[in-house]
Every structure is written in structure tokens, then in C-alpha cells.
Amino acid sequence: MSEIEEKPRHAFFSRKAAFQCGSTIWQRADGSEVDVTAVFYTADIDDSRYGWPDRIYVGEVTRMLRDGMQGDPSTAMLDRRIEALIED
């Protein structure tokens, strides 16, 4: 039986996304844990794929461990209203 090769997964974190939508805790290859808001099979991500302006690349991850931050939908709506007012 052949073993299926796992593609590397690349993780990103956005504080705004975590605050509004929540996050998950993933494990890195070295065993350390990292808070993550998005995972892709490529590290080459632009705004069209993950548009949070404060996103940062947090490295390759191997598996999801548990839920992280819980987003607050009521606060998310308030944040969007405040950002809209600032932009006007």
C-alpha cells in the first residue's frame, strides 16, 4: 500500500479576522503551536485570496489541534461601521 504524501500547509494570522471570526490552534513541524486564521497549500497569498490587510504569514503547519479565539459577531458589525465612518 502506498503512503499518501501530505502537501505542506501554509498558515496566516490576522488579528482582525480572529477578533471577528475566530481562529484555530495548529501545530508546526517542530511541535510548537500557533494561532491561525487561514490555511492554504501555498504561501503566495494576495488580497484576492485572503483580504485581511493585517495578515501575517506564520509558517508551515502540520495539523489542527483545537479552537482558538472565538469571534464576536456583534462586535464585528460595530467594527465595520466604525471603519466605514473613518474611510468617509
Image: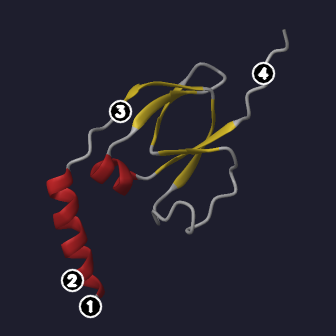
Q: How many marks?
A: 4
Q: Which mark is residue 85?
A: 2
Tell me the element at label 4.
Answer: loop
Say if 67 sits above or below 43 in the image: above
Q: Tell me: 8 left or right of 39.
A: right
Between residues 27 and 1, which one lies in front from this camera angle? 1
Are there few (<14), some (14-19), or many (20+) residues within 10 Å of tag 2?
few
Q: Tell me: 75 left or right of 10.
A: left
Q: Position of residue 24 (x, y in %)?
A: 41, 34
Q: Position of residue 37 (x, y in %)?
A: 45, 45
Q: Are marks 2 and 1 in contact (CB under 8 Å)?
A: yes
First along the sequence among labels 2 and 3:
3
In which quarter of the view is residue 41 placed?
top right
Q: CA distance from mark 2 to mark 4?
A: 50 Å
Q: Where is mark 1, residue-wise?
A: 88
Q: Where is mark 4, residue-wise?
A: 4
Q: Are marks 2 and 3 in contact (CB under 8 Å)?
A: no
The quadrant of the image that shows the C terminus is: bottom left
Which three-letter amino acid code belongs to the residue tagged 4?
Ile
Are there few (<14), some (14-19), or many (20+) residues within 10 Å of tag 3?
some
Say if 42 sits above or below 44 in the image: above
Which three-letter amino acid code belongs to the residue tagged 2?
Leu
Q: Which mark is residue 72?
A: none
Q: Nearer the viewer, mark 4 or mark 3?
A: 4
Q: Where is mark 3, residue-wise?
A: 68
Q: CA distance from mark 2 to mark 1?
A: 5 Å
First along the sequence among labels 4 and 1:
4
Which three-letter amino acid code belongs to the residue tagged 3?
Gly
